[in-house]
């Protein structure tokens, strides 16, 4: 890039957490400034709109609950994706892994007949394993055959979607649903407890926090984590160091797929209590989680912050739809703008830009 | 420091106060201004299901000066509960319409939480003292369309592009097939499923697949005018679905089904306004509205039951009816409309004997299907070919 | 029904449905060859579909609609080029953001344009004489439109440009090793911008094709995930226009068959077939020797800064 010579651009050694935070906040503010044009165009005061959105997402228990409910799957998938991205595995397939987790949990809930608390535990284990298995397919295909991870994970999303459709329209169609494409409701023991009257299924949320901490330790403090980083940052060196690329790839996708599977369990056991149309189970969480993981700069702990932020955005979308009576697609426009500003600000984080004195 | 503490304390107080405040919703007083909230599963621009509900919302809004409305579009099933809460707490709605089957359980749960609010759930089967159910169903109109398709098909193969293999769609295909076979006993109805409510590309390729298999007239269940357009491009007949689609193929769109949700909304809201319906007496209120109640209409455009270009052709084809004798299909259609619009329901498309395509008698001679049987129908009427997931 | 009619119907549908996929895939191939991954295809396509329809509807000129659709796609893609090339931001995220922005903007702007038929679409045509050739005639020369043929012509042209011209060498060099290209005097930034914009133009055209020719009307969300298939097809095609044609047509044929074969196989599972098949073909290809020759551009999704690396 050729810059005008009155600008001085130099690489920052390592941006401090504070710098990253301040620049990110400024980027979000800039995005909101641009988005304000849309509100103004619809004749709504932008300040009033932002006040409503913030109040709607955080200002009362109800909004807060909605924010956290959206945050849960984003947190789990996001943490898993940071690990996959560290090893340079582009997992675009969290969406499918969520669905597989949901399928496995539903199977256990409806047909295992396990008693009481064992049931939920078995559902989480089955969900993790199913998500992990779905993640291991593209991992093995990449590590053994060199198949591109973007295409395999993307294609497997569709396959998972049609498997769910097949199940709810076919063998698993619920007898009590009068022919509609749902399984029967889960027994009570298979439904996750909530915090008070909110829709925050706290066991899944806890799992998300635990996952963030465990993955942070794994990536930064263990031998496996070291290998993951080497494979991601310098594949050549990893070969010389005798690190098995196959094992590392399989490990990261076992984790990434499994955590997405957890998210799927949370959605069916916490929110829907049955298996249903795939487009209703996951509202694009798998894709949004990619952004969440990236904004966290591949740091599992930081995903807690970024997933919360996207929880606010998603819950704030309700305000746009209901209170402001604006077309719901505006939510996409806002999210797109915010993302562009955030990633655009990346340059400011990596480089220090100052005006040269003559 | 102390100031800051005080500030935090104040904020907490305000939050608690606002939460308590929104928890109280007063019961609607008949004759006072009424606010209705509508929850849609899709975008209002889908030109199908949600679009039709929103057209109806605007119609009743114009009709009743005491009515105000608010709508929320593209609400995923998992968001129904919180959205209802918002409409009640923040928007102070007295009446909530939830317009998708998937909202059923959340509607019932919300009704328990807000016993003073009146709910109406579309297409479901669970009711409560403050939850009514409603549905405007097309199966009679599909049957009428089938009569025309049976008379006009040259290949004896009629195509149907279905969204999902659920009872609602199966019932419509069945009624359509009954019509086709009444006029043309050897004709078949070939079905393809696209497994989506809305996907123009899938609808197009499904139609093309049916054309390749020899079909020359088309009915469908999908939220876009694609099938009408594709049939028209190929010079083949079509029957519109849900929204006015005549203008998409003026030469080849013969008729279709149009919905008037406003008929139901107007009746329901007027009765609430008058104090007939309250939050305590809806447990048995179920609107199952058909031709007779004006909730559905035959045609590809309001006020035009049959494309004028096809009237003469339908008059030229005759059938031997055991009751009516030899009549033209056109007259048969008029008779059937009159019979089915009659409150005593002299005729029903599923009047026995009806066999499924495996040869079993599903409706005995002299009997008729109940609403429950219709809404849970899984079997395929004799004359349907093609895949039928969930066939008993 | 004889096998001939099966082949005719399948291949003729293959051309019709494969064309929009192919157009957008060709564009994405160029962007990725220059080292810029653009996951925003869905967003650019829907913007093209919207603007193409509006122009064709208001002016009555479908070709103008398609042209404007391309221009809108191109302009829209500049955002991605700026963010990922100039600002060197992460291309995966930027592409996802572009998809969101496109779906959102087209949805907002497209309000009120639904339910309108386009009376002046690009019509199907039947080529006289040629269409009476047995089997081939009905497939190639009956019921297709001009866009289908133009797209087919574009494939060898773009192949030639990419592999046999100076500019093609520059593009590939920028995608393989921008530092080397830079040292040889190639303007990396300019090439990347141009390729992304060209990709955006073709994605827009593909969207316009959908709303002006394939199914002449506008509904929001009408691209229905085709942009994601394009991403997959680009990889599937090993970044080669010729294989792009094969991949797009193969996918389209399977898509058609997923409706055609429903009488025998469960429709839900059948609809998963094209996606599974894509993976299976890749596995099959990976067994062979083709693999080494056809990797991804080495610098794909890596931003370039002079003096680093």
Image: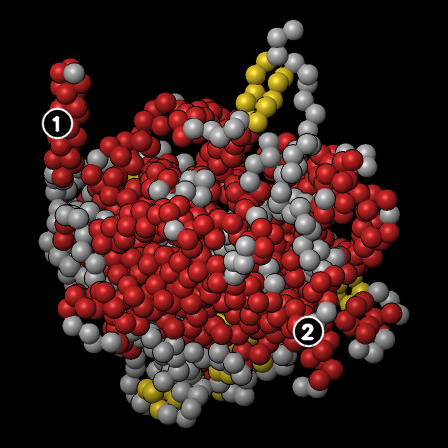
Q: Position of residue A101 (x, y in %)?
A: 36, 64
- Which sits in the foreground, C187 or B310? C187
Q: Which image quarter holds the C terminus of chain B?
A: bottom left
Q: Residue at x 71, y 84 (%)?
A: C3
Please indicate, yes or no, whether residue B94 appears anywhere in the rendered image. Answer: yes
Eyeballing the image, is A355 above or below C166? above
Mark 1: secondary structure: helix
The mark found on residue C70 in the picture is: none
Q: Position of residue B19 (x, y in %)?
A: 15, 35
**Considering only vertical position in the picture, is A82 above or below A52?**
below
Quick check: marks 1 and 2 in contact, CB under 8 Å?
Answer: no
Label number found at residue C10: 2
The answer to which of A213 and A228 lies nearer the viewer is: A228
In the image, residue B44 lies at what x, y percent? 43, 47
Locate residue B84, reporting x and y percent: 25, 47
Q: Are marks 1 and 2 on the same chain?
A: no
What colouring does the structure picture have? secondary structure
Q: Which mark is residue B13?
A: 1
Give the residue drawn at x 43%, y 78%.
B389
Q: How many marks?
A: 2
């Amino acid at each position: 890039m050729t810059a005008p010579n009155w600008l001085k651009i130099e690489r920052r050694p390592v941006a401090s957490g504070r710098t990253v935070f301040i620049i990110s906040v400024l980027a979000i503010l800039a995005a909101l400034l641009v988005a304000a044009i849309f509100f103004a165009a619809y004749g709504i005061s932008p300040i009033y709109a932002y006040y409503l959105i913030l109040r709607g997402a955080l200002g009362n228990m109800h909004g807060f609950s909605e924010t956290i409910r959206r945050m849960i799957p984003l947190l789990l998938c996001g943490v898993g994706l940071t690990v996959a991205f560290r090893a340079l595995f582009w997992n675009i397939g969290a969406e499918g892994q969520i669905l597989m987790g949901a399928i496995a949990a539903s199977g256990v809930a409806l047909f295992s007949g396990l008693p009481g608390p064992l049931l939920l535990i078995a559902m989480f284990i089955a969900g993790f394993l199913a998500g992990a298995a779905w993640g291991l397919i593209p991992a093995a295909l990449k590590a053994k055959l060199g198949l591109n991870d973007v295409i395999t994970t993307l294609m497997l999303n569709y396959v998972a979607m049609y498997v769910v459709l097949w199940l709810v329209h076919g063998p698993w169609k619920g007898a009590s649903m009068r022919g509609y494409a749902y399984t029967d409701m889960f027994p009570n023991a298979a439904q996750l407890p909530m915090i008070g009257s909110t829709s925050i299924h706290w066991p899944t949320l806890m799992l998300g926090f635990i996952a963030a901490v465990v993955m942070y330790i794994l990536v930064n403090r263990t031998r496996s984590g070291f290998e993951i980083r080497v494979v991601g940052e310098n594949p050549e060196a990893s070969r010389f160091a005798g690190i098995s690329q196959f094992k590392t790839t399989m490990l990261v996708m076992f984790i990434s797929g499994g955590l997405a599977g957890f998210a799927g369990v949370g959605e069916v056991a916490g929110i829907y209590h049955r298996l249903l149309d795939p487009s209703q189970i996951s509202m694009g969480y798998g894709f949004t989680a990619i952004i969440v993981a990236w904004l966290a700069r591949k740091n599992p702990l930081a995903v807690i912050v970024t997933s919360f932020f996207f929880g606010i955005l998603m819950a704030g979308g309700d305000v746009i739809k209901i209170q402001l009576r604006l077309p719901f697609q505006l939510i996409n426009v806002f999210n797109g703008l915010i993302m562009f500003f955030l990633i655009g600000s990346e340059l400011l984080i990596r480089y220090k830009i100052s005006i040269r004195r003559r | 420091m102390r100031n800051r503490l005080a500030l935090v304390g104040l904020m907490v107080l305000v939050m608690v106060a606002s939460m308590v405040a929104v928890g109280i919703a007063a019961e609607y007083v008949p004759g006072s201004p009424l606010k209705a909230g509508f929850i849609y599963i899709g975008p209002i621009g889908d030109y199908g299901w949600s679009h039709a509900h929103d057209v109806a919302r605007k119609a009743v809004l114009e009709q009743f000066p005491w009515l105000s409305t608010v709508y929320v579009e593209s609400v995923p099933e998992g968001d129904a509960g919180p959205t209802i809460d918002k409409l009640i707490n923040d928007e102070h709605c007295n009446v909530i319409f939830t317009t998708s089957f998937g909202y059923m359980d959340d509607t019932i749960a919300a009704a328990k939480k807000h016993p003073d609010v009146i709910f109406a759930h579309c297409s479901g089967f669970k009711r409560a003292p403050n939850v009514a159910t409603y549905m405007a169903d097309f199966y009679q109109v599909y049957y009428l369309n089938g009569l025309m398709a049976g008379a006009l098909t040259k290949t004896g193969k009629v195509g149907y592009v279905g969204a999902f293999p659920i009872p609602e769609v199966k019932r419509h295909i069945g009624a359509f097939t009954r019509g086709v076979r009444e006029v043309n006993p050897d004709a078949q109805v070939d079905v393809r499923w696209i497994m989506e409510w809305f996907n123009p590309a899938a609808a197009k390729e499904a139609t093309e697949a049916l054309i390749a298999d020899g079909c020359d007239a088309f009915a469908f269940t999908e939220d876009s005018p694609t099938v009408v357009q594709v049939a028209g491009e190929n010079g083949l007949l079509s029957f519109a679905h849900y929204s006015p689609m005549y203008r998409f193929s003026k030469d080849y769109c013969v008729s279709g089904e149009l919905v008037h949700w406003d008929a139901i909304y107007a009746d329901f809201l007027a009765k609430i306004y008058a104090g007939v319906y309250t939050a305590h007496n809806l447990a048995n209120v179920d609107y199952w509205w058909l031709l007779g109640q004006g909730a559905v209409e035959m045609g590809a455009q309001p006020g035009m039951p049959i494309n004028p270009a096809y009237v003469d052709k339908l008059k030229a084809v005759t059938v031997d009816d055991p009751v009516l004798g030899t009549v033209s299909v056109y007259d048969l259609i008029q008779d059937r409309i009159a019979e089915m619009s009659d409150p005593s329901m002299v005729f029903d498309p599923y009047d026995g004997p009806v066999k499924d395509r495996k040869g079993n008698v599903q409706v005995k001679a002299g009997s008729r299907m109940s609403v429950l049987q219709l809404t849970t129908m899984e079997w395929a009427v004799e004359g349907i070919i093609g895949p039928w997931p969930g066939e008993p | 029904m004889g096998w001939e009619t099966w082949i005719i119907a399948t291949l003729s549908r293959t051309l019709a449905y494969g064309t929009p996929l192919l157009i957008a895939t060709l564009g994405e191939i160029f962007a990725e060859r220059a080292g810029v991954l653009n996951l925003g295809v869905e967003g650019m396509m829907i913007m093209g579909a919207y603007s193409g329809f509006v122009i064709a509807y208001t002016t009555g000129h479908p070709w103008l609609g398609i042209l404007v659709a391309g221009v809108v796609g191109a302009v829209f893609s500049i955002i991605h080029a700026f963010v990922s090339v100039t600002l060197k931001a992460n291309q995966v995220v930027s592409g996802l953001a572009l998809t969101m922005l496109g779906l959102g903007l087209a949805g907002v702007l497209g309000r009120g344009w639904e339910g309108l038929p386009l009376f002046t679409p690009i019509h199907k045509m039947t080529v006289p004489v040629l269409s009476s050739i047995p089997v081939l005639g009905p497939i190639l020369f009956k019921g297709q439109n001009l866009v289908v043929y133009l797209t087919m012509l574009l494939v060898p042209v773009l192949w030639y440009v990419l592999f046999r011209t100076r500019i093609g060498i520059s593009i590939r060099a920028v995608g393989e090793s921008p530092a080397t290209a830079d040292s040889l005097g190639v303007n990396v930034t300019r090439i990347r911008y141009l390729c992304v914009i060209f990709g955006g133009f073709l994605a827009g055209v593909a969207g316009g094709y959908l709303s002006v020719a394939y199914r002449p009307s506008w509904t929001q969300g009408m691209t229905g995930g085709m942009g994601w298939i394009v991403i997959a097809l680009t990889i599937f095609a090993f970044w080669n226009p010729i294989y792009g044609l094969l991949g797009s047509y193969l996918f389209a044929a399977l898509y058609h068959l997923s409706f055609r074969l429903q009488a025998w196989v469960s429709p839900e599972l059948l609809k998963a077939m094209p996606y599974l098949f894509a993976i299976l073909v890749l596995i099959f290809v990976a067994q062979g020797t083709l693999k080494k020759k056809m990797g991804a551009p080495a610098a794909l999704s890596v931003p370039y800064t002079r003096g680093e690396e």
